[in-house]
Image (tube, helix red, strand yellow):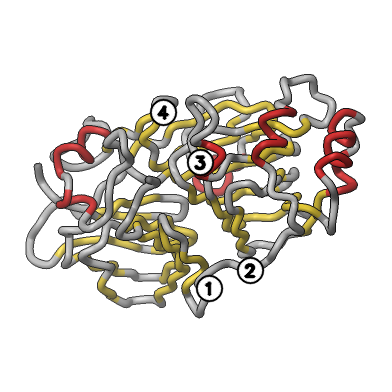
Amino acid sequence: MDVYPLTFVPIYKEKIWGGRNLQRLFDRDLPPQVPIGESWELADLHEGVSIVANGPTEGRTLTDVTAELGETLLGRSRPMPNGRFPLLLKILDATDILSLQVHPDDAVAKRIPDADPKTECWYILESRDGYIYKGMDGEVSPEAFRKAIESDSVAQYVRRIDLQDGDFHFLPAGTVHAIGPGLVIAEVQTPSDTTYRVTDWGRGREIHVERSMECIHFEPASDEAPGADGETLLVTDYFTVAKRTAGANTCIRLPGDHCSVVMFLEADGVTICHDGEVEPHVSARAGDTVLLPAALSGARLSTTGGASWLEITLAETGAME
């Protein structure tokens, strides 16, 4: 199978809290007349699998590409235990508040049938007076929190944070959280869709009291992101996230020897190519996501008008045990 920069067809998810801002911001051709809350940019789950959109492998699934390329794609990183790609990337559009929710950590997921652990982080692409809830706002006992769930008054115990464009937040597994209205977010996470609702703010959807109580870490929330230093925003056991920039009329070498993904925040006249005459080259614009196989050691990014992007690199362990 050929090795080159890979792009994928977005997978759009209708959500009651979604909107149409991906069309406004990134000129996306969205399904008509439905609120789109999530665009899965890179996914290899039963609930959605990315399809290659360019080059000789166009039309192939990320599942197939991961299996066939193996170390050529992943380098020293590992696939998931089921052989799937070990990363999930989304763009979220919240025009209403999401449920207050929590995801299991590794230890809890092992005790719950069909549960997968989930650690994630958010980069704020746009905030229109947006906010999030993240973790506990001070000390609270599990008993008091359970009573607050039953009385639909949990907001008093969780920390609300107002947001601006470019803010970044790390949400390790076990962190109770919610995305408020007015936000467009780039989400980087381990590949899991296991979510337990703590409250749905009176909208009537199912909540998961017992599972949530099993998962929640009750320590007060921290603003620290492990490994943050300069352009590096976060280092986890699964992936590293950095924010990169390039000025006009520049050409820089992209990471080699590690499997990495670039999510473009801004892009004016951007092309990703390979040393020599390897095709295809990729033209990118804001909102685009490009997967760079580990064996693509000569990839270069060229700009005419400048660019900024998130660079997500798989850790060498690369997957949950």
Is 311 displayed left or right of 36 in the figure? left
Sequence-wise, which precedes: disc 4 or disc 2?
Answer: 4
- For the C terminus, the quadrant is top left
Kindly tell me whether residue 215 is visible in this rendering.
yes
Near-viewer residue (286 or 230):
230
Mark 1 to mark 2 CA distance (whole Å): 8 Å
- For the N terminus, the quadrant is top left
Kind of residue at disc 4? Gly
Q: Residue at x 60, y 40 (%)?
A: 103
Q: Residue at x 73, y 25 (%)?
A: 207
Kind of residue at disc 2? Glu
Q: Is residue 150 above or below residue 234?
A: above
Is 65 displayed left or right of 229 in the figure? left
Circle 4 — which element? strand
Q: Residues within 10 Å of mark 1 (few under 14, many from 20)?
A: some
Q: Which residue is mark 3?
A: 117
Mark 3 to mark 1 CA distance (whole Å): 23 Å
Sequence-wise, which precedes: disc 4 or disc 1?
Answer: 4
Q: Residues within 10 Å of mark 3 (few under 14, many from 20)?
A: many
Kindly tell me whether residue 132 is visible in this rendering.
no
Q: Residue at x 30, y 59 (%)?
A: 316
Q: Nearer the viewer, mark 4 or mark 1?
A: 1
Circle 3 — which element? loop
Mark 2 to mark 3 CA distance (whole Å): 21 Å
Q: Are marks 1 and 2 in contact (CB under 8 Å)?
A: yes
Q: Residue furthest bottom?
A: 230
Q: Which residue is mark 2?
A: 224
Mark 4 to mark 1 CA distance (whole Å): 31 Å
Query: Mark number for residue 245?
Result: none
Q: Residues within 10 Å of mark 2 (few under 14, many from 20)?
A: few
Q: Which residue is mark 1?
A: 228
Kind of residue at disc 3? Pro
